[in-house]
Amino acid sequence: MKKIIGFMLTLSMAFGGIAMPVQAAEEEMRGVWVASVYNIDFPSVSNVGNVSAQKAEFSEKLDRYKAAGLNTVIVQIRPKNDALYNSEINPWSDVLTGSQDGYPQYDPLEYMVEETHKRGMKIHAWLNPYRVTTSGTDVSVLADKNAAKKHPDWLISHNNALYLNPALEEVQDFICDTVEEILVNYDVDGIHFDDYFYPDKYPLTNGDGDGPEADQRREDINSLIRKVHETVEMYGDNDVEFGVSPAGIYKNTVDFKGSQTYYNGYADTLEWIENGWVDYIVPQIYWETNHSTAPYEEVVKWWDKQVEGTDVELYIGEGLYKDVIAGEIGSHLEICGKYDNVSGNIYYSSKDLLNNRQGAYDTLKTAYAETHIENDTQNQTKPNVPVKTVNAKYSKSSVMVNGVEKTLEAYNIDGYNYFKLRDLAYVLNDTDKQFDTVWDEDKQSITLSLGEKYTEAGGELEAGNGSDKTAAVSNATLYVNNSPVECEAYNIDGNNFYKLRDVAKAVDFGVVWNNELNAIGIVTLVGYSE
């Protein structure tokens, strides 16, 4: 299957970007990291006074992930010794409300699990096990509930930041208790650690990276990984997985070199693989194919050999935050398709994916295009039907709403202007023509509720990058007050864009065009006219 993806993607490129759906194995990992630290990916804003907006933001992101063909989200629910879930032993994370242990008025993880599973996707709970602060060493500013404030003797500091001490058995037990609490209370599909173990290059007393002190640090980390694996086996359902995403290079070889996780973070990843303490490993191979010291394929090939003959799944971490990586992600999928032990890819981060950095979202959507499977006794697949695509020209027309200029992302297709429904709903709020939008994943439909105030989801009125796009015909059904209506729509970068005049007719607001000013007018004081 992985070889098929590479082959079909090559055909897609050769034929000018025509969408060529490929068959995906059921267990292939197509994941995205959703970072909460610094509010990188989610939530984009504090939910104080607006819980529904934070919920809607996550749900809309899920819709876009699924539209790209992804099947798993890895959400950072423990960024700094805190929690994006209701915990007895960890304080609420400050990324939710702006203050640590501020009650967000709902349980984010509970909502995330429900929404993710409703879409037929999986969710892994991403924990940073040791980090307490990203900057500052004053424990008095932490919430009283924070274990670091209760037990300052558990802490080490490095580069003006605090960490739980990996050497302490009390710390290891506390982290296992945290994992246990999550597994008992939430139906997550996995527990996930990233690449932060001992602080990077935390100094040794004797300075010998292969000496007894360094070996003891590696054993400290090994002990936690082993205990967490046992905790997952004990408290998780049979299909709950435990995985770790280390830095891409274990140790330097003759074929590549760089920052070595064995020495810099004291993470002995091969020990975990050999002992089966992880169910999957995701090396962060954040380099391009022709990198001078760590060419992408050489590193992939090395990891492919390390999991050979084991029960550990290998997924490749992709750094879409780098332009060069985002731009050649299609080539990376082709390379991964050559290696039998590579079982999928995970992308960092959500923001870069959804912003279609260097066209990465479009590339993945093409590579992961769904096919229909005929479930008969021979398990034959139906013929693949290419998705109909057209050119969407970025619209430079100004938009006036009741005489006030607004900035909306719009595209011209076959002489008609297409807008995002959420943008239109946003600018019509508090007018006689306001409406809310609701997405139904099961029905693949959008319902407009006329007269209701629009519920903000975050990201409204974000300007496009000024470039023309490839638009795919959208099969989503549009309902207005539960009645289906005929509307032309296209999917662009995971968002549905609707013909303005179709929406105006459905909602009954006026649309005017001024050719001299190259301006579109939306008027709510009058009804729609042809």
Image (cartoon, rainbow, N blue to C red):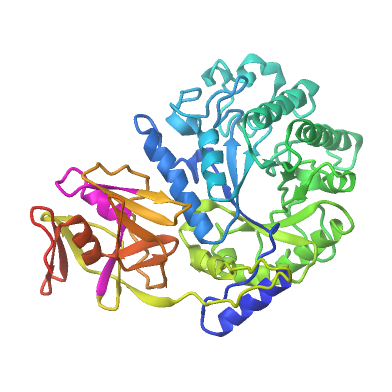
What is the span of residues highlighted in magenta in the rendered image? 416-437
Is 493 magenta? The answer is: no
Q: In the image, is 376 to the left or to the right of 427? A: right
Horizontal side of residue 423 vs 44, given as left or right = left
* Residue 351 point in image, percent of width and height: 49, 52
Relative to 93, say whether 274 is above or below.
below
Viewport quadrant of the C terminus: bottom left
The one of 520 and 155 positioned closer to us in this rendering: 520
Residue 318 in the image, given as x and y percentages of width and height = 63, 58
Query: How many numbered marks are there?
Result: 0
Give the image location of residue 235, x and y in percent: 74, 30
Which residue is nearer to you in this view: 147 or 504?
Answer: 504
Q: Is residue 250 above or below residue 380?
A: above
Q: Residue furthest left?
A: 526
Looking at the image, which residue is at 56% across and 23% down? 91
Examine the image and state in which quarter residue 346 appears.
Answer: bottom right
Q: Is 364 on the left-hand or right-hand side of 252?
A: left
| Residue 295 in view (yes/no) | no
Displayed quadrant of residue 202? top right
- Check the picture and name the quadrant holding the N terminus: bottom right
Extreme-front residue of the structure: 377
Q: Position of residue 280 (x, y in %)?
A: 76, 49
Q: Quadrant of residue 330?
A: bottom right
Rendered residue at 62%/72% (across/down): 22
